[in-house]
Image (spheres, rainbow, N blue to C red):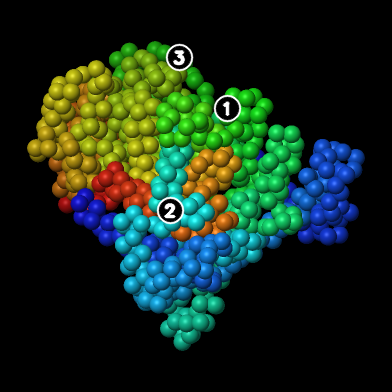
Amino acid sequence: MIRVLLQRLAIAVPVLLGVSILVFALMEWIPGDPALAILGPMATEENLQNLREELNLNEPLVVRYGTWMQGILQGDWGTSYSMERPVWEEVRERFSATLILAGVAFILCILLGVLAGVAMAVRQNSLLEKVIMVAVTAGISTPAFWLGLVLIQIFAIHLGWLPTGGMGPAMGEVGWMELLPYLVLPALTLSLVAASIIARILRARMIELLRMDFIRTARAKGLPERTIIWRHAFRNALPPLLPLLGIQAGYVLGGAVYVESIFQWPGIGSMLVAAIQSRDLLLVQGGVLIVATTYVLLNLLADILQHALDPRTLS
Amino acid sequence: MSKSLNQWILSVAAVLIAVLVLLALTAPWLPIADPNESQLDQRLLPPLHPEALLGTDTLGRDIFSRLIWGLRVSLLVAIAATLVAAVIGSSIGILAGYARSWFDQLAMRGIDLLMAFPYLILALAIVAILGPGLINALLAIAIVNIPFFARTARGITLGLTREPFIEAARMGGQGHLSVLFREVLPNVFPTLLITSTTTLGWMILETAGLSFLGLGAQPPTADLGSMLADGRKLMLVHPHVALLPGLLIFVLVLGLNLLGDGLRDRLDPRLRGGALNAPGAATTVESIVVSAKGPETDSKQSLLSIRDLVIEFGQGAGVVRAVDGFQLEIHAGQSIGLVGESGSGKSATAMAITRLLPSPPGRIAAGSIEFDGRNLLSMNAEQLRRVRGKEVAYIFQDPLGSLNPLMPVGQQVAEAIHGAESMNRKALNEKVVALLEETGLPDPATLCKVLPHELSGGQRQRIGIAMALANDPRLIIADEPTTALDVTVQRKVLELLDTLRKNRGTALLFISHDLAVVQAMCSQIVVLKDGRIVEAGESETVLRTPKAAYTRQLIEAIPSL
């Protein structure tokens, strides 16, 4: 296990390094004056001149990357001109809001996806399977940004059960119970596509497993169907499901961009869109860096968990 | 889902997509309003208005016309993005798979790096560099999808380069370029085509999404995503302005996805997900016959009584009768061998007894099976469950496949014990250890925690025997229990089974293709051929004076040592 752990870390570290280089290069690839790109069109000539010196534009690329990386590690992510505050503070605040939404959506998509997938496999050829299959196929084809609007129209405007958006009265200080009504619609919207994908793949895998000999053995022992489905079939479907869950985490983090903008959730996704529109590139850089790093780490975790849950892959 | 329903869905999707594509293609010549002509005196007309079929937007532009023009933009951008991603991605993939070595390493590490970003975040980063706009959004979506095509193409190419015909072409003096174009590309192309169709739906969602965020199509271009964004502010009063373009995207993508799934099932059956059937908890029984207890059989004494059993596989014209008119009586403590070559229906019969035969495709078409005077064919799943393992236990052929690969073997033995839930942990543990000891496994306490793949074949089958003995059943059905083992292990396992069975007075139904083994284990023999009994009687008699020609053939096939 420790060997696998080290092995996976040995793969993840260069990937993280590569991610940081790509994100650093974001600024290099911008056409035109990087100082102008950082300070924005309203910057004074004096400030621009100061920044150009600070950026050491004459230094070789490698040196500049080193300086940049050092700053990142020390929490100095630059200053956002559109927000007029340090990038790190803005990113940290926005990202914690995203983590709440994406975390709830991720749990929801696993719950919905697993239940739907297992139900389809177990009740194969039934009306229930057909109904879920239609829902799942529709789920994969639904634009999240449209679904969000439809849900707002029905549950917030028409029925008035839930708020149309936002994150509650006082951000940061509210408890989970106050946050819940604000979470329901965006989390549901965000989880739908990922849940549909999980359901489809799990259905096929569960059918494959339910045909295997060890399931016949379990039935021959006289075990209850519930035990056979969950402890035997699903337990074996779980390890290969984990890398898929890692990928779904990416869909959820990416989809947060739409959902946050529809529901005015003050997360990293709506921050990124606003930052791109105002061409606040330091903010874009910070946002992309934190999301990509999280995604790499989540996939690393999924990979390690997969091996922990299936010891056969260790040898 | 049924075949005809799938066929129907596929046809509907095909017609739908054909109509939408036709509308998009012919938009400039259709008798519809100019999508960008704003009539400020006709702003926000509701749908089904005589002036505009689906109403107008804030600037008084005709929504129906804008939808069709928006459809045109969406399809065009999505197809272009798919083409760019497919061409670049599969070129990288094919070259990497073909050249391997450093190029493969480099290309794949690059691909891995792109995949380290959630796809939409990467697309946003690319738009951030290039600036918002339709073409830039197209490029961003294309780049984001390159890894997918590269990986797919590389996988197939890697497989192809190991094929003999590629090697033959190389040996025949063809240059790399010629091999790539004449041999590799034609074989990769069909899969890439299917992959492209299945990604088209995604591409449409992604481009519409970027436009929705204001990073794709810019006003006044009619684009489904930006129309949705425009309509958002009017959701309270005029929801149709936003909901209609979204609905069109949904219908378009749904149609494409259904079409893609259908195409994939047609052209590449290996990828088909729903072709297999998971068997239910018990074999389907077509007609339940309550056996007339005739005076000729003493069913009071017999433990298991099977009469006129018919087992069928498949449906409609493809029905195969695997077992026809099978009869068997087993008394308490008796051992009977069921002999026949593979396909004779002996395993199907053995599985059918407690209705473990997978349904579909198998089913019990007629006959009766009674155990201890109870009709097994009329039992519900819960009643059957109480018989299985407790009164009738099985030992299967492949000891590796028959064990759950991820559950410690001790736990698998423990759960075989009926009523284990109500036993305390210590008592259960002791019972498991005792069972393993009985089957001659060394160091049972340690062995309990081990997974099946860590054991040898013989050890695994001993676990199988321990599970079968767990409840002191009255009948054990052993389906070729030693066929998968080496000859020396085989003998030991058989001896063990024989001793334990005799000590406990358990009846045995022993299924095998090997007459010599059956003779050693059983007092009675039933010979099965093509689903019918050809001979039955005392082991000695059958072997010494076989009546059927088939039995003689089987006897002659025994290697004399």
Residue placed most toward the observer, B93 or B512: B93
- Whether residues under marks 2 and 3 lie with C-beta atoms below 8 angstroms apart, the answer is no
Query: In the rendering, at what x and y percent does residue B199 appear?
Result: 58, 56
In the displayed orientation, state which residue is furthest to the bottom.
B173
Q: Quadrant of the N terminus of chain B?
A: top right
Query: In the rendering, at what x and y percent does residue B30 appear?
Result: 86, 56
Instruction: Give the residue at mark 2.
Output: A87
- Whether residues under marks 1 and 3 lie with C-beta atoms below 8 angstroms apart, the answer is no
Query: In the rendering, at what x and y percent does residue B10 appear?
Result: 67, 47
Give me the residue at 17% from left, 32% from top. Answer: B498
Give me the residue at 40% from left, 52% from top. Answer: A88
Taking the image as shown, residue B210 lies to the left or right of residue B358, namely right
Q: Which chain is mark 3 on? A: B
Mark identifier at residue A162? 1
Q: Which chain is mark 2 on? A: A
**Mark 1 or mark 2: whose residue is earlier in sequence:** 2
Q: Which amino acid does label 1 sit on?
A: Leu
Taking the image as shown, residue B205 lies to the left or right of residue A301, namely right
CA separation in Å, label 1 and label 3:
66 Å
- Figure check: A140 above or below B465: below
CA separation in Å, label 1 and label 2:
33 Å
Mark identifier at residue B292? 3
Q: Which chain is mark 1 on? A: A
Residue placed most toward the observer, A302 or B560: A302
Tell me the element at label 3. Answer: loop
Residue B83 sits in quarter:
bottom right
